[in-house]
Image (cartoon, grey):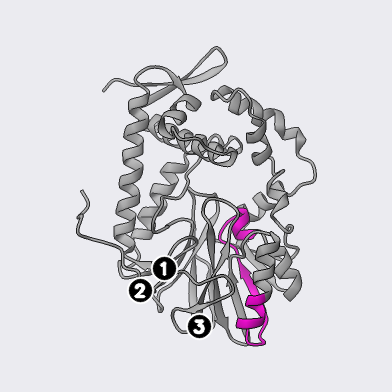
Amino acid sequence: MLNKTQELVYPYPGIPAPGAATELENGIFWMSLPLPFAMGQINVWLLEDGDGWTLVDTGPAIPECQSIWNTLLNAHLRGRPIQRIFVTHHHPDHVGLARWLSDRFSCDVYLSRETADKVTFLLQDDISYYEAAVSQFYRAHGICEPAAFVEFETGRKYRRIVSGSPERMRYLEDGDTLEVGGRAWRVLLCNGHARGHAALYCDTAGVLISGDQILPKITSNISLFSMESETNPLAEYFASLQRLRTLPGTTLVLPSHGRVFSGLHLRIDQIEQDHHARLTQVESFCDRPRDAAEISSLLFPRQLNELNRLLALGETLAHLRFLESERRVQGSTSNERIVYSRLPG
């Protein structure tokens, strides 16, 4: 059990206002951009890098963010160019303006190969050939009208807020080291939230740029989607948390959403406890055969918009997949639907 007296430490007073920047350590700047969905904002990080800058993540390709970027570029680059862009993962709030900024500064975009492949796939002009398989997947899990789910998974909405696939991409491997401003940043590839998600850790600064892998207030969405239906994302996420636990507990964590904090090990404990509580919930709902859509509605009883319905179902499926791997529940097909039942013992 967690020690209830322990709390995360937030060493900085608040999130920077759009168009402003807060210097954290020498040469590390924290900036924030607005998001048009529930998260509300995303943090991006500017690292001094010799005669220029390395940027970590970009925000989505929406006019409001582009306008704020124009302010940030004029106010905080001090006449020095962005020399390199590092993208943590393929979600549009992280990669959305990578092409736009890369073209503007003629710089390379660094990302994992899995992230690059996913961006390229989702930005194809026509992937209608995939729609039938996506539709069938969601119908099998209890979604009678899966059109909105298909729209998200096949990139129709993605293409609206991503500026394009960067032309100049450099692929990162787990354990690679990036030299930025005289500091070595180690690349940590972590699955679970997104395949090929890349975090950056600097031992000398004691700083982890965690992307969405570790957030201070909410647990990152861990979903099983149709195109990765054979994976076990929650098991992979737990494994990534154990890897991050090997970093010092005093590490300063720079998350993609919310405030900068310290207390890495405590936050990992909290996240693990949240997921194990969710696993117990899901298992209890399998007291009789139910499909994933019904279980999801029990887990998330409030009214959800289309995106959050997709994420809620994906999270439910990820927990069901983990329970199956632990032989706590079993999925079987009944009337062309997959239903889940709790196993004895």
The amino acid pointed to by label 3 is: Gly
The amino acid pointed to by label 1 is: Val
- Residue 64 location, x and y as percent? 67, 63
The magenta span reads 71-95
Asked if residue 223 lies left or right of residue 156, the reply is left
- Residue 42 location, x and y as percent? 54, 62
Q: Residue at x 73, y 59 (%)?
A: 163
**Comes first in the chain, label 2 or label 1:** 2
* Badge 1 density bin: few <14, some 14–19, many ≥20, Cα 10 Å: many
Q: Is residue 111 magenta?
A: no
The C terminus - image quarter: top left
Compared with residue 152, is residue 254 higher up or lower down, i.e. above or below? below
Asked if residue 114 lies left or right of residue 284, the reply is right
CB under 8 Å between callouts 2 and 1?
Answer: yes
Q: In this figure, which residue is indicated by the disc labeled 1? A: 260
CB under 8 Å between callouts 3 and 2?
Answer: no
**Comes first in the chain, label 3 or label 2:** 2
Q: Quadrant of residue 331?
A: top left
Q: In this figure, which residue is indicated by the disc labeled 2? A: 11
Q: In this figure, which residue is indicated by the disc labeled 3? A: 27
Compared with residue 174, is residue 235 higher up or lower down, i.e. above or below? above
Compared with residue 150, is residue 237 higher up or lower down, i.e. above or below? below
- Residue 111 location, x and y as percent? 61, 62
The amino acid pointed to by label 2 is: Pro
